[in-house]
Image: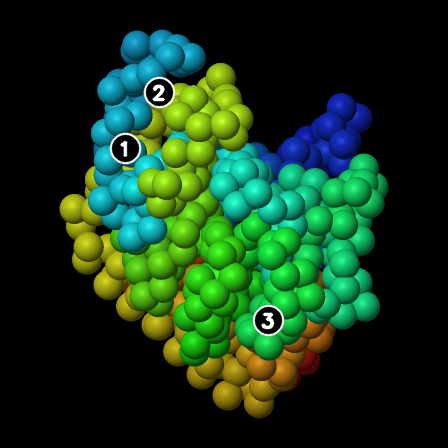
Amino acid sequence: MKTDNSRALFEQAQAFIPGGVNSPVRAFKSVGGTPLFIKRAEGAYVYDEDDNQYIELINSWGPMILGHKHPKIEQAVLNAVQNSLSFGAPTQREITIAELIVSMVPSIEKVRMVNSGTEATMSAIRVARGYTGRDKFIKIEGCYHGHGDSFLIAAGSGAVTMGTPDSPGVTKGTAKDTLLAPFNDLEAMRKVVENNKDEVAAIIIEPVAGNMGCVLPKEGYLEGLRELCDEHGIVLIFDEVMTGFRLAPGGAQERFGVTPDMTTLGKIIGGGMPVGAYGGKKEIMDYVSPAGPVYQAGTLSGNPISMAAGLTMLSLLNENPEVYTSLDEKGAYLREGYEKSLKDLGLNYTINSVGSMNTLFFTDKEVHNFEDAKTSNLELFRKYFHAMLDRGIYLGPSQFESLFLSTALIDNDLDRIIKANHESLKEIHGK
């Protein structure tokens, strides 16, 4: 495909924007080549600046669950724009969307709107610390909770080792209060808690990981975390920025039947507009200013345009539960097609999927945590990514990302993806 305009724009962008992009994964650094500059999108398709059409499986990293340019969401935004872009003051719509979120998400009795998933997770940790009077928290290796300093911590020599900064600019002082444990390892988590007895404010986790690729919780893992937190007075936080309203109306916590103390949200809640939220038990959320002593604020929080898009999106999902049946069916159909191709080509790679999230890992090892995911052949993924792109399928440009389906995908689209997947695997393996 001709990508001259994207190449020219990327060259121009690098002179004014660090790395030429406003979020690192967009630079295609892990797969090589020139990132596509997108001009427009509709339904299941995006179009780049050279007018190439792609079936896309990123969907703005999750929020476009109903596809791009949904007419009702678009109209809601256009209507809201007529009344100004921002007030910095309360609006009725904020109450309506808060009531809807509370009715849909099992763990949330009160909710605070913010502007991004990063804001939501940062705020949730602060509130958990204020509520418990403890300083430390535990995150899961390979789970991503935004770019707040406390979250940019890598594992040390093992699961019970203190974290060390994973990015320049993150201080050792910040790192010392961040503890780590591997995904799906209850025993390791228990050791971390016991080694820091009465010091841990919160455990934060993606209930289904989406940032080491799609990694599902083992049976009993989330339930075990719930019991451990109850035993030690720790606030359990589910980061459902990706899974919230995607895996079920009430997110992963509804799908797996485990209720955390707090939940962070984003992506879908804004219908494509910048937004985030955190919520939980009333007694915890009442620690948030101005009701309580934990300060958190934002001029654009509850922005009327974002609230208009989000309320329309959540209402559509809440009133049409068949959306989730459709997404599950599409996810199962795609997985079956991928599995058939792997079998026909004699390849033993791992597919992880749940509902409308999935990842093809280029490893023959089962993937249950970040260390498993890192056994993937990244050079093969790089070749596969470009082979799929050449066939008009736009994937996330990293092995360590989940793909996201939308209801806009029709059977013909899914068949095209399956065919492209088969041809791409055949090509990169010379079969």
Q: What crowding class fits label 1: few (fewer than 14 Cα within 10 Å), some (14-19), or many (20 or more)?
A: many
Q: Residues within 10 Å of mark 2 (few under 14, many from 20)?
A: many
Residue type marked 1: Ile
Task: Determine the CA span between mark 2 and mark 1.
Answer: 11 Å
Q: Callout 3, which amino acid?
A: Arg
> If the image is split into quadrants, where does the C terminus sit?
bottom right
Residue at (37% x, 12% y) in the render: 89
Task: State if disc 3 and disc 2 touch (CB < 8 Å).
Answer: no
Q: Residue at x 76, y 56 (%)?
A: 163
Name the element at disc 1.
helix
Residue 370 is tagged as none
Residue 161: percent from the left, percent from the top?
77, 64
Query: Which residue lies under the disc numbered 2?
Result: 304
Residue pointed to by mark 1: 97
Mark 3 — residue? 190
Image x and y of residue 359, in percent? 52, 67
The answer to whether 377 is drawn above or below residue 153 in the figure is: below
Taking 37 as reference, is 28 left or right?
Answer: right
Viewer-closest of 360 and 100: 100
Q: Neighbour class for label 3 at 10 Å: few (<14), some, many (≥20)?
A: some
Check disc 2 and give the amino acid type.
Pro
- Determine the CA span between mark 1 and mark 3: 37 Å
Q: Nearer the viewer, mark 2 or mark 1?
A: 1
**Local secondary structure at mark 2:** helix
Residue 229 visible in rendering: yes
Query: In percent of the image, x 64 and y 78: which residue is there?
Result: 363
Q: Secondary structure at mark 3?
A: helix
